[in-house]
């Protein structure tokens, strides 16, 4: 499941609004710095009409509220499955030190996950939940790509395969599609509200949206979210 581009994209506004997390991953921090500059480029204009400001606010609302709702819903589904995965691994009669280290790391994702958060008030709580969300999907990827020769590979891959079935993957894809569809429609409305002069200053966003709209492959479409914030693109 391709998650990093879309998660970084929708995390941008939330992550740049607080300095409360001192040990953010270096790569995530660099990505967010670029994202902030691009978001400001969309938002900064002294000549915008009330309609344009309303469309910009809609974009920010989707980032703040809808994305957090997506993270919250997916988190609620993966937490009990992750708990069962850990229990299955802990029940193994023999565990190597490497496997136990993996179990401990996975357990930290559950321990660090806050329960009830108000996305309009608790920015730090939202960020922490997003980080845990990213950690969870990083674990899924790491387990999937784990070298076969490692002694813990078989046990980890079996436990995750037993608990994270096709239904979880399909539900995730479905919720992600709803989120991206809402954002893309908001982008379309925003671009259509610009006059010719304003459109001239938003050619990068317009070109990106055209590529996004024309791309039919869902995996490649998600990759395009990262390209919007790629300075070399």
Image (cartoon, grey):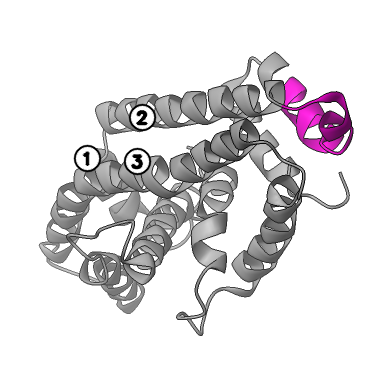
Marker disc for residue 175: 2
User: Is residue 2 at all visible to an observer of this figure?
Assistant: no
Q: Separation of disc 2 and disc 1 at Cα?
A: 22 Å
User: How many residues crowd around disc 3 within 10 Å: few (fewer than 14), some, or many (20 or more)?
Assistant: some
Marks 2 and 1, the one that precedes in the sequence: 1
How far across and how far down the image is residue 224, in percent? Answer: 69, 35
Query: In the rendered structure, does residue 201 fall within the stretch colored magenta?
Result: yes
Label ID, residue 70: 3
Decide: marks 3, 2 in contact (CB < 8 A)?
Answer: yes
- Residue 40, above or below 171: below
Q: Residue at x 43, y 49 (%)?
A: 64
**Picture quadrant of residue 200:** top right
Left or right, 27 with respect to 83, comes to right
Which numbered disc, 1 or 3, marks the residue that appears first in the sequence?
A: 3
Q: Is residue 19 above or below residue 5?
A: below
| Quarter of the image where one finds residue 87 | bottom left
Give the percent coordinates (x, y) of residue 188: 64, 22
Task: Name the residue carrying label 1.
Answer: 162
Gap between marks 3 and 2 measured at Cα? 7 Å
Left or right side of 10 for 74: left
Q: Which residues are magenta?
A: 194-211
SS category of the residue bearing label 2 = helix
């Amino acid at each position: 499941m391709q998650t990093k581009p879309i998660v970084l994209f929708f995390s941008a506004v939330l992550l740049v609004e607080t300095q409360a997390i001192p040990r953010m991953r270096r790569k995530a921090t660099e990505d967010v710095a670029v994202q902030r500059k691009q978001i400001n480029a969309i938002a900064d204009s002294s000549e915008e009409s009330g309609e344009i400001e309303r469309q910009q606010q809609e974009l920010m609302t989707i980032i703040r509220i809808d994305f957090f709702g997506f993270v919250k819903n997916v988190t609620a589904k993966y937490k009990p499955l992750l708990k069962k995965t850990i229990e299955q691994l802990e029940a193994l009669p023999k565990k190597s030190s490497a496997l136990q280290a993996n179990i401990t790391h996975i357990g930290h994702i559950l321990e660090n996950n806050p329960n009830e958060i108000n996305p309009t008030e608790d920015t730090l709580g939202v960020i922490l939940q997003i980080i845990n969300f990213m950690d969870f999907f990083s674990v899924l990827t790491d387990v999937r790509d784990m070298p076969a020769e490692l002694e813990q590979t078989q046990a980890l891959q079996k436990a995750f395969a037993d608990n994270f079935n096709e239904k979880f993957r399909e539900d995730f894809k479905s919720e992600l599609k709803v989120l991206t569809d809402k954002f893309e429609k908001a982008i379309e409305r925003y671009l259509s509200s610009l006059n010719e002069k304003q459109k001239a200053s938003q050619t990068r966003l317009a070109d990106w949206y055209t590529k996004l709209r024309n791309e039919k492959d869902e995996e490649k479409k998600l990759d395009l979210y990262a390209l919007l914030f790629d300075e070399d693109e």
